Amino acid sequence: MTTIAADARTGVIVSDSKMSLTSSDVWLVVRKIHRHKADLIGISGDVEAEMKWLDWLSSGRKGRMPSNSGIEALILRKEGLFYLLGPATEFKIERGWHAIGSGGGLALGAMSHGASAEEAVAIACQHDLGSGGDLQIFNLKDA
């Protein structure tokens, strides 16, 4: 449950910060966008699978690649925006912008009408119960 939107034209990727706990109405603030070398990676889905995949990536892709079933990711690079499909398959999003997560459809609708990635995630947070908290905003230009 999350909303992540990215726009390669502006070099910005944005997420909400809410992680819902299944056992209660309580939620935590978490980081959903991670920098790996020059890339910015926004990951949505199963937290345990996310952490295993990020650890594998950070180790230089050494050892057995963990399954990334249950997660989806947007990877923002200077070359453009990519969607992670399957364990290691990435494909470029030619239009240059996209959104994922439980609020992804809401964010996509907003972006298709001219909203920035930040505005799109803010809109999704107003209507998607799985998204909320403060927005996390990252720019490729920032080291």
Image (spheres, rainbow, N blue to C red):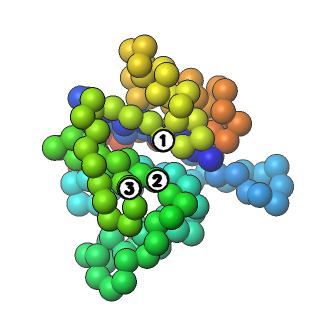
Q: Position of residue 60 (x, y in %)?
A: 26, 75
Q: Is residue 22 left or right of residue 60?
A: right
Depth order, front residue of 115/30: 115
Tell me the crowding category of disc 3: few under 14, some 14 to 19, or many 20 or more residues within 10 angstroms, Cα based: some
Q: Which amino acid lies under the numbered mark 1 shown in the image of this protein?
A: Ile
What's the mark number on residue 100? 1
Question: In the image, which is nearer the foreground, mark 3 or mark 2?
Answer: 3
Q: Which amino acid lies under the numbered mark 2 shown in the image of this protein?
A: Glu
Q: Earlier in the sequence, mark 3 or mark 2?
A: 2
Tell me the crowding category of disc 2: few under 14, some 14 to 19, or many 20 or more residues within 10 angstroms, Cα based: some
Q: Examine the rendered structure and indicate whether residue 52 appears above or below residue 70.
A: below
Mark-to-mark CA distance, 1 and 2 = 7 Å
Do labels 1 and 2 touch, CB within 8 Å? Answer: yes
Quarter of the figure with residue 134 = top right
Mark-to-mark CA distance, 3 and 2 = 7 Å
- In the structure shown, which secondary structural element does the residue marked by tag 2 occupy? strand
List the residue tagged with mark 3.
85
Q: Earlier in the sequence, mark 1 or mark 3?
A: 3
List the residue tagged with mark 2.
72
Q: Earlier in the sequence, mark 1 or mark 2?
A: 2
- In the structure shown, which secondary structural element does the residue marked by tag 3 occupy? strand
Q: Which amino acid lies under the numbered mark 3 shown in the image of this protein?
A: Leu
The reply to whether residue 95 is in sight is yes
Q: Is residue 136 left or right of residue 13?
A: right
The residue under the point 44% across, 36% down is: 99
Q: Is residue 51 left or right of residue 63?
A: right
Depth order, front residue of 1/137: 1
The residue under the point 50% across, 58% down is: 71
Tell me the crowding category of disc 1: few under 14, some 14 to 19, or many 20 or more residues within 10 angstroms, Cα based: many
- In the structure shown, which secondary structural element does the residue marked by tag 1 occupy? strand
Q: Position of residue 65 (x, y in %)?
A: 37, 77
